[in-house]
Image: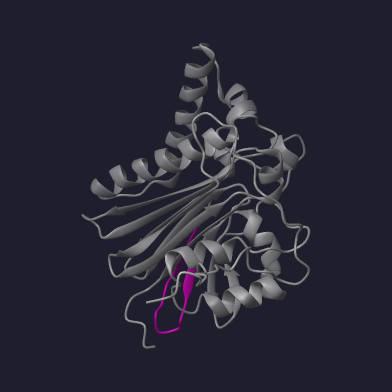
Amino acid sequence: MASSGAVRHRPRLVRGPVTIGEPAAWLEPRLARAEPYRPDTIADGGEVLGLTVRAASVRGLTKRFAGGPRQDDLCLRSVEATETLLIAVADGISGAPRSELGAALAVRYATAAAARQLDAGTLDWVDVFQQAAWGLIEEHRRLTGDPDAGAEQAAAQLATTLVVAAITGSRVQVAAVGDSPALLLAAGRYTALVPEPERADGLIGGAVEALPRSVGGLRTAEGALSSGRGEVLLVCTDGLSLPLAGGEGEVGRLLARELRHPPDIIDFARLLDFSRATYDDDRTLVAVWPGDDPD
C-alpha cells in the first residue's frame, strides 16, 4: 500500500492537433453560437457492405476563434436492397448567413432522395440534386414565412456546395455542385473523379456554384474502387483539398501514409484536425476502403 505521503499523477494526454510544417496559432475554441446546435467536431465510421468507412468534420480555426458554427456537414446511408453506400458532403458558403443549416439539410435530402431512387432500381443525379435544392427552398420559405420565395432568395441565406457518391461493389458514381471534390488515393497519388468546376462571376461566396440555384452546374463521373490497387475513396470539402495541393506537399504525403489502412475513428478525426499555418477553414472528409485488403 502506498504511504499517505505518496503523490498520484493522472495520465497525461497529448494536447493539441497533429502539426504539419509551420503550425497555426493555438487557441481555446469558443462554443459555437448557432441554432440548431452545431458541435465543433463529429466523427463516425464502421464497416458496411464489405467496405470500411471513416468520416469526420471539424470546425476551422477562424470559426473557433469567432464562435461561429461549423458550416460543413456530411451524411452516410446504406441501401441494403442494392448493397450501395451513399456518401454526401456539403460545404456551406460563408457569404450565406445560414449556410450551416443549408449544408445539414442538403446532405440529408440528397441521401434520402438517392436511397428512394435506388430502391426503385435507378439513380437520377439531376433529380437527387433538384430534390436537395427544393428542400432548401422549402426551408427558407418556412423560416421567412414567404411562400413565394425562390432559389435566389434561398441561396442568399442557405447556399451550400454538395458532392454525393454512391458505391456499389467496386463501382463508384459521383455527382457534385461546387468545389467539394471526390478523389481516389492510390500509391501516394490523388486523382480527381469529377472535373474542377468552372468559376463564374456573380455567384455567392467568391464565385462558387452552390445549391439551391446551381443544379444546372451538376458534374457527374464514374470510377472503380479496387482493393487490389490499394485505393481509398476520399470525399471532402475544399478545407482539406486545398492544403492537399494535389498530394505534392506535406499534408498530402502525411495523409497518403496515414490512410493506407483505416485509422481508429477518433484518430481519424484528430488527423483531419491538423495544424498548419494559413489553413483555417472547416474540414470534412469521408474515406472508404474496399474489402479484401491483401495486407
Q: Which of 97/165 is in front?
A: 97
**Range drawn in magenta:** 221-233
Answer with left or right where residue 79 lies relative to residue 164. left
User: Within the magenta stretch, is there residue 277?
Assistant: no
Q: Which of 135/37 is in front?
A: 37
Query: Colour mode?
Result: one colour
How far across and down, in percent of the image, does residue 15 sit?
A: 61, 64
How far across and down, in percent of the image, does residue 69 sit?
A: 60, 38
Residue occupying the point 77% across, 61% down: 277
Total count of labels: 0
Question: Would residue 281 be seen by someone viewing this image from the given angle?
Answer: no
Q: Going by the picture, which residue comes out furthest to the bottom?
A: 295
Residue occupying the point 57% across, 80% down: 257
- The C terminus lies in quadrant: bottom left
Q: Is residue 178 above or below residue 6?
A: above
Question: Would residue 11 be seen by someone viewing this image from the given angle?
Answer: yes
User: Within the magenta stretch, is there residue 232?
Assistant: yes
Residue occupying the point 60% across, 32% down: 33
Q: Which of 266/244 is in front?
A: 266
Q: Is residue 31 above or below residue 254?
A: above
How far across and down, in percent of the image, does residue 245 sit?
A: 71, 67
Q: Is residue 21 above or below residue 134?
A: below
How far across and down, in percent of the image, does residue 66 sit?
A: 71, 39
- The N terminus lies in quadrant: bottom left
Q: Going by the picture, which residue comes out furthest to the left?
A: 81
